[in-house]
Amino acid sequence: MSFIQIQDIHLDRADRMAEIDELAAQWRADTAGRRTLLREHAYVDRTDPTHVVVVAEFDSYASAMVNSALPETDAFAARLRGLLAGPPSFVDLEPLSGHDERVALADVFRADIERSEATASAYTDDVAFVGMFPQALVHATGPAELTGILASDGPGHTIETWDVQPTPAGFAAEYRWRTTGETSYLSVGTVLATVTGGRISRLVCTCAGSWDAEAEARITGTAVGVSA
């Protein structure tokens, strides 16, 4: 969870946003490699086009203060004030609690991989799966076909790495897992998921290959044990 700063501003004219966007673009160019701003979104009041709320996200309050102390930030703020009807107001928000449905869906998908069975309620009825593997390009549609893809890889999977990052459209995950069964195969790669209406609607999986113990040792230079 991150530190949020909300800036509430009133423009002196409704058509000022183009000028503000130019100022912001110049600030980003001037502070490349030094700014600590993670992301920023501007929202306009539906009932008052001169009322704009800017939501800025930082790693922490200390990180936000580093960004605020940049001389270019002072210069930007001075030029911005000339486009406003009055001084802006600020609200600084420390993280307290939260829930991210994208991360929750990533957890469901991980559990489905572990047991090689898709939880139908977590996916749209026409969820599309695209698997880009070294020797095949695999397509599947719907939770049942997704289950078939997972089960064809192995009766289950033991996940060793599952690094998830939410994206604007869903989530991305770096994975490393081994199939269970008589012979264990290692797979490493990435998953890019699209979330629509609170359910996973598309999965794109890239994989470097399914390696048995001998192939893994040859490719990675590391001897491994094989567990069923």
Image (cartoon, helix red, strand yellow):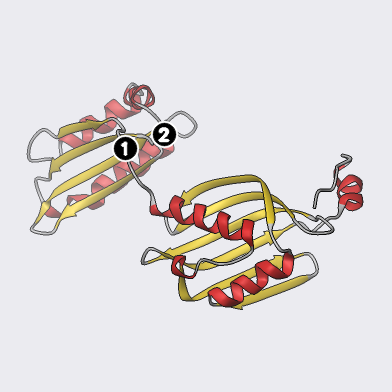
Residue receiving disc 2:
30
The answer to which image quadrant residue 74 occupies is top left
In the image: residue 167, left or right of residue 144: left
Q: Is residue 119 above or below residue 60?
A: below
Residue receiving disc 1:
97
Pick the front one: 92 or 175 = 175
Q: Is residue 155 above or below residue 11?
A: below
Does residue 225 appear anywhere in the picture?
A: yes
Does residue 83 appear anywhere in the picture?
A: no
In the image: residue 23, left or right of residue 157: left
SS class, disc 2: helix
Q: Amino acid at mark 1?
A: Ser
In the image: residue 197, left or right of residue 119: left
SS class, disc 1: loop
Of the two numbered discs 1 and 2 on the same chain, state the one appearing first in sequence.
2
Which marked residue is nearer to the observer: mark 1 or mark 2? 1
Q: Is residue 115 above or below residue 10?
A: below
Q: Residue, x 51% and y 66% (percent of image)?
A: 119
Instruction: Please state the horizontal and vertical placement of residue 44, each as a whole percent of the image.
Output: 18, 53
Total numbered labels: 2
In the image: residue 202, left or right of residue 153: left
